[in-house]
Image (tube, rainbow, N blue to C red):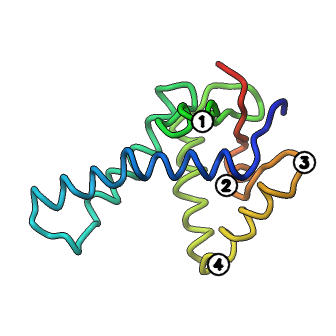
Amino acid sequence: MSNSVGFWKRFLAEVLDSIIIGIPLAVIFGLITGQWEDDNISTFVVFLYTMFVPIFWYGYTVGKRMMGIRIVRVDGKKISIGTMLLRCLVAGIVYGITLGIGFIVSAFMVGLRKDHRAIHDFIAGTYVTSNKP
């Protein structure tokens, strides 16, 4: 795993995705539906974005691309829907079952481990790198 990326670059990529994708989607759905408190639809669309954009864009999301980082599989194969389901959905369930403790542990793993892999990376067999496709 060459050029694995640590906590701050990954964190900033998530912040950029939230600002560039998440907030505009929430505003658009709020304007369309008039329901500003119910963000289920925009949350679902953000989930689909997180799932599918890396599959079709070499492991990048908009935020990751801006930070020069991307998701790759440990075995070198192309990211698939199965990979992203494991990374997003299954990991999300694990984080939910542990009441967020797993998420906090993952943040420390990314910051402290030499390979910078989080729980969701281990579940999906992925890591985040600065290597270009």
Q: Which quadrant: the N terminus?
A: top right
Work out whether residue 84 or residue 63 is closer to the camera in this orientation and state it: 63
Q: Secondary structure at mark 3?
A: loop
Return the disc, 4 or 1, that comes first in the chain's sequence: 1
Q: Is residue 99 above or below residue 116?
A: below
Return the disc, 3 or 2, that comes first in the chain's sequence: 3
Return the disc, 4 or 2, that comes first in the chain's sequence: 4
Q: Which residue is mark 1?
A: 67
Q: Secondary structure at mark 2?
A: helix
Return the disc, 2 or 1, that comes first in the chain's sequence: 1
Q: Which residue is mark 4?
A: 98
Q: Which residue is mark 3?
A: 114
- Residue at image location 62% in from the left, 68% down from the top: 94
- Residue at image location 77% in from the left, 30% down from the top: 75
Work out whether residue 114 or residue 41 is closer to the camera in this orientation and state it: 114
- Quadrant in which residue 29 is drawn: bottom left
Number of labelled discs?
Answer: 4
At label 3, the amino acid type is Lys
